Image (tube, rainbow, N blue to C red):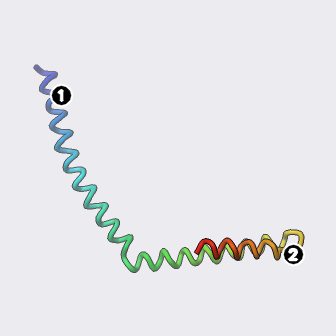
Amino acid sequence: MGKATFILGLGVGYVLGSRAGRERYDQLKERATGVWNSSRVQSKVDAAGQTAKSAVGSATQKVGERMPGGGSDASASASRQSASAN
């Protein structure tokens, strides 16, 4: 009887814990989604994206300048890639 009681206790604890855990998880997920979708966070995300695009473009141009042929092909390729990404 001791084993059966212990296993029953584990089962009840698991069920009750998982219900409380799921509710708390849903609360945290809702808060995180709200923060992510806020206008302040999204403006920072957009600014970071623009900074990254600018950095990639200038790095591509610098690499192209060091390539044989003056890099005109590399910068044209970077422009095409940048335009297709938008």
Task: Name the residue that disc number 2 marks.
Answer: 70
Please name the residue shown 14% across and 23% down the image: 4
Which quarter of the figure has residue 77? bottom right
11 over 40 or under it: above or below: above
Residue 17 x, y percent position in the rendering: 20, 45
Total marks shown come to 2
Neighbour tally class for label 1: few under 14, some 14-19, many 20 plus, Cα within 10 Å: few
Which quarter of the figure has residue 7? top left
Q: Secondary structure at mark 2?
A: loop
Q: Is residue 34 left or right of residue 50?
A: left
What mark, if any, has residue 7 been given in the picture?
A: 1
Q: Amino acid at mark 2?
A: Gly
Q: Is residue 70 left or right of residue 32?
A: right
Neighbour tally class for label 2: few under 14, some 14-19, many 20 plus, Cα within 10 Å: few
Measure the C-alpha gap from mark 1 to mark 2.
75 Å
Residue 22 x, y percent position in the rendering: 24, 51
Residue 45 x, y percent position in the rendering: 48, 74
Instruction: Report the mark closest to the observer, 1 or 2.
Output: 2
User: Quick one: label 1 or label 2, which is nearer the N terminus?
Assistant: 1
The answer to whether the residue labelled 1 contacts the one labelled 2, judged by CB atoms less than 8 Å apart, is no
Q: Nearer the viewer, residue 41 or 74?
A: 74
Q: Amino acid at mark 1?
A: Ile
Q: Is residue 41 left or right of residue 29?
A: right
Please name the residue shown 67% across and 71% down the image: 81
39 over 32 or under it: above or below: below
Residue 68 x, y percent position in the rendering: 89, 69
The quarter of the image holding the C terminus is: bottom right
Please name the residue shown 18% across and 41% down the image: 15
The quarter of the image holding the N terminus is: top left
